[in-house]
Image (tube, rainbow, N blue to C red):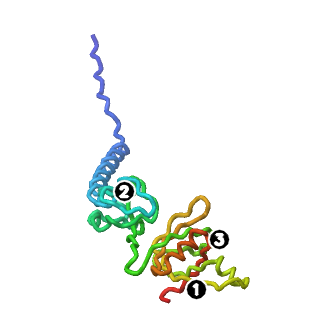
């Protein structure tokens, strides 16, 4: 019998690009783990809304909670350490559960000081300054009906009532904005009557006047 020729072992062809792809995937996996660990370590304690808070309502300790989240540095969130200081402030707009509290979402109560009273005024869009109003603005409230009567020779127009804006509410579906102002206690009743009748026109005084 003749000798059977020996079969040479089959050698697999090396594929360098597979080795490179494996190394790349391993590196990406390691970078992903490092990023996740870093992101978890950058979480901070911030204030979040726990329950519904209506416009103008005083915030209680039960309304806000502390959440630990990762926040973009450009977002001015309120730190959790300020919780006790922010309890008792007022919501200038409606707050809903899950919202992170940021600067401007809470305001001081605006309670009137001695000799002052707080009067709410409903301001229709046509009587609201184009630039809007903000807490701290000083205004003159004019009884427009009284002034019109005086122009017609009936009676004497009452003097404008100086007041300070302490809170500005959201615009409702009819374009009306409710603002809270403080004024002298002696002028409060007259301003309240004019506001109830919808006769208040506003004059914004210059800053620092």
Against 120, residue 161 (above or below) is below
Give the percent coordinates (x, y) of residue 109.
38, 70
The answer to whether residue 117 shows anywhere in this view is: yes
Q: Are marks 2 and 3 in contact (CB under 8 Å)?
A: no
- At 64% from the left edge and 77% from the top edge, which residue is drawn? 144
Residue neighbourhood size for the residue with mark 2, other residues' Cα within 10 Å, grouped as few (<14), some (14–19), many (≥20) = many
Location of the N terminus by quadrant is top left
Against 157, residue 169 (above or below) is above
Q: Quadrant of residue 59?
A: bottom left
Dot 2 corresponds to which residue?
A: 49
Give the percent coordinates (x, y) of residue 132.
56, 73
Q: Nearer the viewer, mark 2 or mark 3?
A: 3
- At 44% from the left edge and 58% from the top edge, which residue is drawn? 54
Residue occupying the far bottom of the picture: 209
Give the percent coordinates (x, y) of residue 75.
40, 65
Dot 3 corresponds to which residue?
A: 126
- Which element is circle 1 on? loop
The answer to whether residue 75 shows anywhere in this view is: no
Dot 1 corresponds to which residue?
A: 159
Q: Nearer the viewer, mark 1 or mark 3?
A: 1
Frontmost residue, 202 versus 188: 188
- Which element is circle 2 on? strand
Q: Is residue 117 left or right of residue 68?
A: right
Residue neighbourhood size for the residue with mark 3, other residues' Cα within 10 Å, grouped as few (<14), some (14–19), many (≥20) = few
Marks 2 and 3, the one that precedes in the sequence: 2
Marks 1 and 3, the one that precedes in the sequence: 3
Residue neighbourhood size for the residue with mark 1, other residues' Cα within 10 Å, grouped as few (<14), some (14–19), many (≥20) = few
Residue occupying the far right of the picture: 152
Q: Nearer the viewer, mark 2 or mark 1?
A: 1
Q: Are marks 2 and 1 in contact (CB under 8 Å)?
A: no
Residue occupying the far top of the picture: 1
């Amino acid at each position: 019998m003749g000798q059977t020729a020996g079969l040479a072992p089959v050698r697999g062809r090396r594929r360098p690009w597979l080795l490179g792809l494996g190394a790349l995937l391993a590196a990406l996996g390691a970078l992903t783990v490092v990023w996740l660990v870093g992101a978890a370590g950058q979480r901070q304690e911030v204030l979040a809304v726990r329950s519904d808070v209506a416009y103008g309502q005083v915030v209680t300790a039960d309304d806000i909670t502390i959440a630990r989240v990762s926040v973009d540095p450009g977002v001015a969130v309120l730190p959790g350490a300020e919780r006790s200081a922010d309890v008792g402030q007022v919501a200038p707009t409606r707050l809903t559960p899950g919202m992170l509290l940021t600067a401007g979402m809470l305001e001081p109560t605006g309670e009137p000081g001695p000799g002052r009273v707080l009067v709410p005024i409903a301001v229709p869009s046509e009587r609201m300054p184009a630039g809007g109003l903000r807490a701290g603005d000083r205004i003159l409230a004019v009884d427009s009906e009284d002034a019109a009567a005086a122009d017609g020779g009936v009676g004497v127009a009452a003097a404008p009532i100086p007041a300070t804006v302490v809170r500005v509410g959201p615009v409702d579906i009819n374009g009306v904005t409710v603002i809270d102002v403080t004024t002298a206690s002696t002028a409060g009743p007259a301003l309240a009557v004019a506001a109830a009748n919808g006769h208040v026109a506003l004059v914004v005084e210059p800053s620092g006047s």
